[in-house]
Image (cartoon, helix red, strand yellow):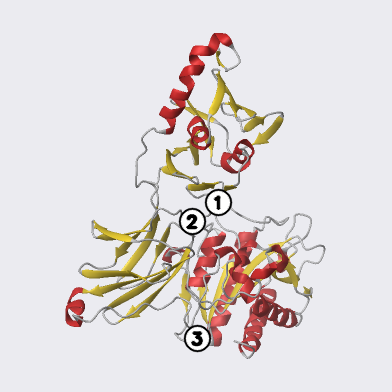
Amino acid sequence: MTQLIHPLRRHSRVLFILMPILGLALMFWPARTLRSDNFVFYLPDASHVLPLQTIGSASYLPLLQVLNTVGRVQGLTVAKDSLKVWFNDSQIELRQDNKRVRFNKEKINLSEPVRVQSGQFMVPLNFLETVLPRLIHESVVYRLGSRRIFIGDVKPGTFSFRLDQVPNGSRLTLEFSDKIKIRTASSNGKWVLYLGNKPVQPLEQKFNFQDPYLSNIQFDDQDGVPKLILTPTVDGLNFYPKIDDTGKIVTAELLKAQAAVAQQPAPPPPPQAPGAGTPSAVAPAPPETAASAGGLGLPMVVLDAGHGGDDSGARGGNGLLEKDLMAQLVARVRSTLLASGKYRVVLTRVGDVNLTLDQRAATANAARAKVFVTFHAGNLGVHTSRIVVYTLEAPSWPPSAGDAQVSGLFIPWGTVQLSQLRRSQQLARILQKEFTAISGATVSPPATAPLRELRSVNAAAVAVEIGSLAAEVDSTALTNSNFQAGIANAIVRALDEYEGGPS
């Protein structure tokens, strides 16, 4: 039996009167705080916390609560396995266990099927970027995989930070894109740094350190209040946070208690701006996803083996997977670089794991890489031993950002590479020249592309693609040890020449 609720039908007037009450009840349904099973909606006038539910391997939100958070449902029709909703000037129709949503007369596919749990129609998070903007006619900023969304003219802030050693402790310097107001609290041996009521979009939820005083920093806004939770590595530390006159730079010192007593009554050392001398470092990826080797003081090279885990990349006709080929090639390049004794090397991917592009860039920036090289393979035509070097295609961003300087400024995460393009292009030209010396290889001139994996890297950054890796091409030549050794040796020669160029 179908229940009909629509404002234009007289016989459903009672249910229609009750509907706003139902909507308010759903909107203000209590959500558990400080937990990863909440989702935060940031609107111009307030923030709202909704319960997030995992069904299978996907995350879901209750549809009616979402709609009543961003507006008001005007009517709905509920059937056993379907739901029609009138919202603003639009109508949407959903069916249980079906990925297809009917929006007015248009059909939109979601990433996961609609589910019904405890009588509620649940939509996957993909709904927020595919359907919601059309319903509310406002801008929606949502990064897939995150647990927050920004509606209308809400502009979230971001931050970068660096960690420095000081006598008897460490100094954490955070630089925010907007002014903030901080307050601190202590809970269960951790320090909580509240960032005020302005929304914040972190690069990652958690940053791990290999530091004797600070173990990790975790961003949390699951109760609608942005905050950083700092976990010390050892007990008995004193915590001295301080904000500068601009309201954007916070310096926090973690000092051994006895050292703090010895320094009294002198105040803690003054804060240092993250841009002084070196670029602001982005926090490192968890240690299990990055491996490093090489002597201290040598230039740092970060190597990124594309794809991994459930993202296998391209597939050759003989079953060769891009993720496996890139891991093999990166291992060869790493060993050759270390054998030269001239470079330190960090790998973004260790083992068969699927890292986000932000995690890979964060590893490079945390290591303060001089050079970042990401490796890929694809269908490059009939030539099987072909090499192309790519740099970022600059026109994909506003030209005004192209001359931004890193020192002393906060640069948005998605535009960091713009300040390094000249170095990246110089490196690409040198690599192309050295690759031409590889016997049997076809080397194309350096090219540009809007590569997302390069956008956030604060170093000379290039993508090296080899091919062809395609079903119709014999790709066994790409696994040839002489071919891979030629690539590794060419990279060492190119870096030697690049080292002699502009720093």
- Disc 1 + disc 2, Cβ < 8 Å: yes
* Residue behind mark 1: 143
CA gap between label 1 and label 2 equals: 9 Å
Q: Residue at x 64, y 58 (%)?
A: 321
Mark 1 neighbour class, 10 Å CA radius: few under 14, some 14 to 19, many 20 or more: some
Q: Three-letter amino acid code at disc 2?
A: Gln
Q: Three-letter amino acid code at disc 3?
A: Leu
Work out whether residue 355 can be spotted: yes
N-terminal of the two: label 1 or label 3?
1
N-terminal of the two: label 1 or label 2?
1
Q: Three-letter amino acid code at disc 1?
A: Arg
* Residue behind mark 2: 201
* Residue behind mark 3: 298
CA gap between label 1 and label 3 equals: 36 Å
Q: Quadrant of residue 308?
A: bottom right
Judge by depth and name the residue closer to the eye, 477 or 282: 282
Q: Quadrant of residue 477?
A: bottom right
- Disc 3 + disc 2, Cβ < 8 Å: no
Q: Quadrant of the N terminus?
A: top right
Disc 3, SS? loop
Q: Quadrant of the C terminus?
A: bottom right
Judge by depth and name the residue closer to the eye, 31 or 115: 31
- Relative to 493, 266 lies left or right: left
- Residue 327 vs 431, above or below: the answer is above
- Relative to 420, 178 lies left or right: left
Camera-side mark, 3 or 2:
2
Mark 3 neighbour class, 10 Å CA radius: few under 14, some 14 to 19, many 20 or more: few
Camera-side mark, 1 or 2:
2
